[in-house]
Amino acid sequence: GENVEQHPSTLSVQEGDSAVIKCTYSDSASNYFPWYKQELGKGPQLIIDIRSNVGEKKDQRIAVTLNKTAKHFSLHITETQPEDSAVYFCAAPGGYSGGGADGLTFGKGTHLIIQP
Amino acid sequence: DAGVIQSPRHEVTEMGQEVTLRCKLISGHNSLFWYRQTMMRGLELLIYFNNNVPIDDSGMPEDRFSAKMPNASFSTLKIQPSEPRDSAVYFCASSSSRASVFGSGTRLTVV
C-alpha cells in the first residue's frame, strides 16, 4: 500500500513569512495529492489538491508543487496570517481498488504556528 | 448543503458496551469513508464504500468493528464490544470525485 511521510511535525514562522511543508509518497501509481487543514475540534478541510498531470497549482496565498520523479509534493503558504495556524495534512490515494474515489493515506500532520 | 453530518459529536461509554456512530453523506456523493484519528497513529482509513458497496475494509482493526451503508445517504460504524483502546475521534467523509469532504467527527471515549 501507499506510505506517506510528512515533515516537519511542527513549524513556527513569523507572521508575514512563508511556510513550506513537504511530503513524500511511495506508490508511483498515485495520481492525486490533496492537502487538508484541520483546526481544533473540527474535521480536516480540503484547501488545495493537485493531480499528477501538472507540476504546480496555486490558489491565492497557497500553492502546491509536485515532483513525480522524486515522489514528493510540497505545500507553500506565503504571507502567513494568524488564521493559518492549524494542523496541515498531506495525503495520497491508498491504492485501494474498486473505482470511484479512493481512500486516502495521510501524513502524520504538521502543526503550523504563526507567531505575531 | 449542510455538509457531512455525524452524530453524536461526543460519546462516552463503558468498556463492553456497543457503540454506534452515524454519518449522513452529502447529497449526490457516491463514496463514503470512515477514518479514525488518534495522537499515536494519526488519521487512518478504516473502510470505504462506493455506491453503497464496501470496497476495502482492510483498515478495520478487528471483528468488533463493522460498518454498513443501508442506503445511498447514510452509514453507521458499530463497535461491539467497545474497549478503552477504541477511544479516538472517528470521522466520516464523502466524495463524488477525488476530493473528500469530512464531517466534524465523533469523539469516542471508552472508560
Image (cartoon, coloured by chain):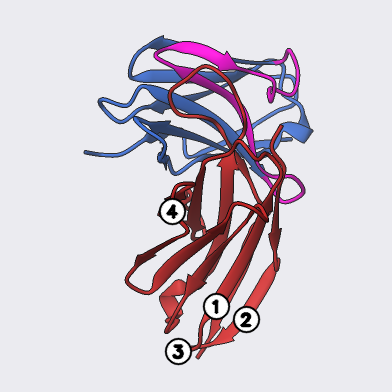
Chain colours: A red, B blue
Between disc 4 and disc 2, the foreground one is: 4
Q: Mark 3 points at which residue?
A: A16
Residue B48 drawn in magenta: yes
The answer to whether any part of residue B68 appears in the image is no
Q: Tell me where residue A32 appears, x and y as whole percent.
A: 49, 43
In the rendered structure, which segment of residues is drawn in magenta? B38-64
Q: Quadrant of residue B3?
A: top left
**Amino acid type, label 2:** Ser
Residues at discs 1 and 4 in contact (Cβ within 8 Å): no
Q: Is residue B14 above or below residue A49?
A: above
Indicate which disc residue A54 carries.
Answer: 4
**Amino acid type, label 3:** Gly
Please tell me which residue is depicted at 68% across the width and 15% down the height of the picture: B80
How far apart marks 3 and 2 lie (CA) works out to 12 Å
First of labels 4, 3 by sequence position:
3
Indicate which disc residue A12 carries.
Answer: 2
How far apart marks 4 and 3 lie (CA) works out to 28 Å
Please tell me which residue is depicted at 64% across the width and 53% down the height of the picture: A69
Q: Mark 1 points at which residue?
A: A19
Q: Quadrant of residue B66?
A: top right
Circle 2 chain: A
Q: Tell me where residue B79 appears, x and y as whole percent.
A: 65, 19
Using the image as rendered, state which of residue B92 and residue B52 is in the foreground. Answer: B52
